Image: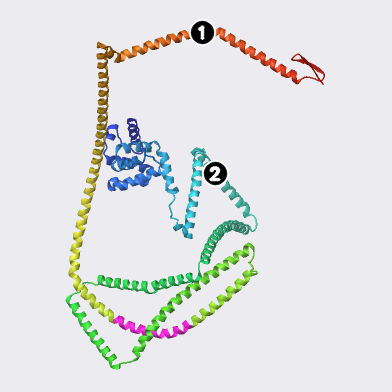
Amino acid sequence: MSDQIKFIVDNLNKEPFRKNYNLITFDSLEPMQLLQVLNDVLSEIDPKQVVDIREEMPEQTAKRMLSLLGILKYKPPGNATDMSIFRQGLVIGSKPVIYPVLHWLLQRTNELKKRAYLARFLIKLDVPSEFLQDETVADTNKQYEELIEAFKTLHKECEQLKTSGFSAAEIRRDISAMEEEKDQLIKRVERLKKRVETVQNHQRMLKIARQLRVEKEREEFLAQQKQEQKNQLFHAVQRLQRVQNQLKSMRHAAADAKPESLMKRLEEEIKFNSYMVTEKFPKELESKKKELHFLQKVVSEPAMGHSDLLELESKINEMNTQINQLIEKKMMRNEPIEGKLSLYRQQASIISRKKEAKAEELQEAKEKSASLEREVSVKTNQTREFGGAEVLKGDEFKRYVSKLRSKSTVFKKKHQIIAEFKAEFGLLQRTEELLKQRHENIQHQLVKKLNSLVSEKKSALAPVIKELRQLRQKCQELTQECDEKKSQYDSCAAGLESNRSKLEQEVRGLREECLQEESRYHYTNCMIKNLEVQLRRATDEMKAYVSSDQQEKRKAIREQYTKNIAEQENLGKKLREKQKAVRESHGPNMKQAKMWRDFEQLMECKKQCFLKQQSQTSIGQVIQEGGEDRLIL
């Protein structure tokens, strides 16, 4: 541990830290100061870590340091429980946790700088799989991964160039040589200019040469652009293939389902979406706009006095009288047309809503048709470039004709619907003008009423606004006081947390010491009991040995051992005698055994000879056997 601290102090006193520590001052640093030293070392490795930890929450500091140490591949010692202790020690600035981290960082500062620099570009963003289903997101992610791979190759080339052995002196010599070549080229160009000036039409020739150079550059640019367009075409083909695969899968899914259920589900979705778009959302938006406009008016207008209120009251009375006169005139006329108009207006509103929905659908269909036509033209051009146009044959042509017939019937129906809509549009246009006039009149009256309501609300809200201002001031003061108390609480909590950790360590040490002493106590008790048993057996033995009773003496262990020794000595004597007899008879017995083995070999040889002699008997041979002569023919 002392060597570790010495290494840390020596490196902190060097460039770029210049801390001027010794072993005593470094060991006496507070936890916050020790964490600041660790943060300074990390900021030297990664400049983004330059932070004053006094202005940062302890949890944020620990999270930031742990993330950087994870990027730098620092492995704390121990298992999962030790990891929790490591995190807690990093929060409170524990020396047993900070010292190994500093030692590990200062040992390999240059390597870790390189790793932190590369981590900014090589750590990939985790994009959820559901977002990758979008084509633009998938293409962007693919481009991002390609850029990462390009960065890797460029970085490797840069490192190879750094380690290739080119020194600064060689580069300077190369630069000076190139400058000399540049001067020589300039002189040569001047000499050639002087020679060209004597030639006729030299300006025209220079112009043609310049145009040739421009055309060559343009040719290179066009070749590059052609390559880019080929790449774009390749990506477009891939995108088309993906879309076709999706279309096939959707068609396959639609083929498995029943058309009645699909149509029913689609109709329900269309009804719901049209209701949400045409009725619910516009009404909510209109109400929100009105509320916002009303509030903006209330806020923008200044506070009104008594004279302003009297003037508004007089205007309101005048407008009320005019409204009453108009109502009386209307009642005197008693026109029955108004009742019919209300029915027509209701029908017109219903038809207008239908018309708007159908018009939107028609517009979307037209836009989709136009886009599909553009795509078809592009694809046909591409197919012509690659291998000519595609010709339909057999069943495909029949299916194509049936599709065209169905589309023509649909087109006729849509055309008829459009004609009906145009006829309805002429009727509805007149009703719309009448409704607009009525709407303007009603809106004018509503504006007047709203102005009167605004004035009333302003007069009612004036004292409330004054109280609100006072309450805002009080709220600001209380928030400042709360922030101050919170900072005091955080500092106090940090101090108490550090004291608690120290006390926990002391309690843990005392508990371990208590357990050791308790185990020692139990061990000594067991040893005492064993010694007491041995002492008791020794006293019993002495009593039995000293006793005059023969039976007691026989029970003594000494008598038993002496008896066993005598028996073993007699047994050893007998075994020695037996060994002596064996040794004396060993030579003759071995000789006799050898003679028997030789006799066994001799008899085996005679047996083999006899068997061989029997197998080799020839015709006409006389064999004497058992006192008889036999002739084998």
Give the colouring mode of the picture.
rainbow
When the figure is inspected, residue 572 is found, relative to residue 341, above or below; the finding is: above
Residue 277 in picture, x, y percent from top left: 40, 72
Residue behind mark 2: 178
| The quarter of the displayed image where residue 475 is located | bottom left
Question: Does label 2 or label 1 sit earlier along the sequence?
Answer: 2
* Residue 583 image label: 1
Q: In this view, does 396 lie to the left or right of 280?
A: right
Mark 2 lies on a secondary structure that is: helix
Circle 2: residue type: Met
When the figure is inspected, residue 550 is found, relative to residue 518, above or below; the finding is: above
Would you say residue 142 sits in the magenta stretch?
no
Residue at horizontal 47%, vertical 55%? 141
Task: Identify the magenta region.
Answer: 420-444
Residue 465 in picture, x, y percent from top left: 20, 67
| Distance of label 2 from label 1 (alpha carbons) | 107 Å
